[in-house]
Amino acid sequence: MSSETPAFILSALTSVGGIIGYARTGSVPSIAAGLTVGALYGLGGYRIQTRQPYGIELALLASVVLAGSSIPRAIKTGKPLPIGLSVLATTGLFIYGKGWLDSR
């Protein structure tokens, strides 16, 4: 699997999740965060695919932002949604953290 594929998958999942969060609860922060993180993943994936600089860094940034918001909530609440987001963030941190370290 090439390194842009996980970015595109994470982009879709976080964007759709933000839209669903807004549709279910009317939460503007959910849609804003979901679409912003999804856009970062999508742009990172596009830049990786077209071999432009900073693609891995953008995907890593999206993972850090997602982890920073979801992991504390997962620990505090133990609810399935923050736990799922934490798993996505951790996946992105592993893939793109390793990619960033390998590119140095």
Image: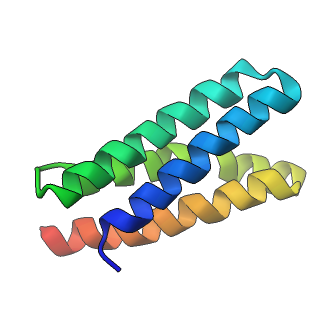
| Residue furthest out toward the bottom | 1
Q: Position of residue 61 (x, y in %)?
A: 38, 46
Question: Is residue 94 in view?
Answer: yes
The residue shown at (12%, 67%) is 104
Q: How is the image coloured?
A: rainbow
Q: Name the image quarter holding residue 90.
A: bottom right
The residue shown at (40%, 58%) is 7
Q: Position of residue 71 (x, y in %)?
A: 68, 53
Q: Position of residue 39 (x, y in %)?
A: 42, 37
Question: Is residue 67 in view?
Answer: no
Q: Nearer the viewer, residue 102 or 75?
A: 102
Residue 8 vs 95, above or below: the answer is above
Horizontal placement of 99 versus 42: left or right? left
Residue 45 vs 19, above or below: the answer is below
Q: Position of residue 83 (x, y in %)?
A: 76, 59
Q: Quadrant of the N terminus?
A: bottom left
The residue shown at (26%, 57%) is 56
Horizontal placement of 103 versus 22: left or right? left
Residue 9 vs 68, above or below: the answer is below
Label total for image:
0
The residue shown at (73%, 60%) is 84
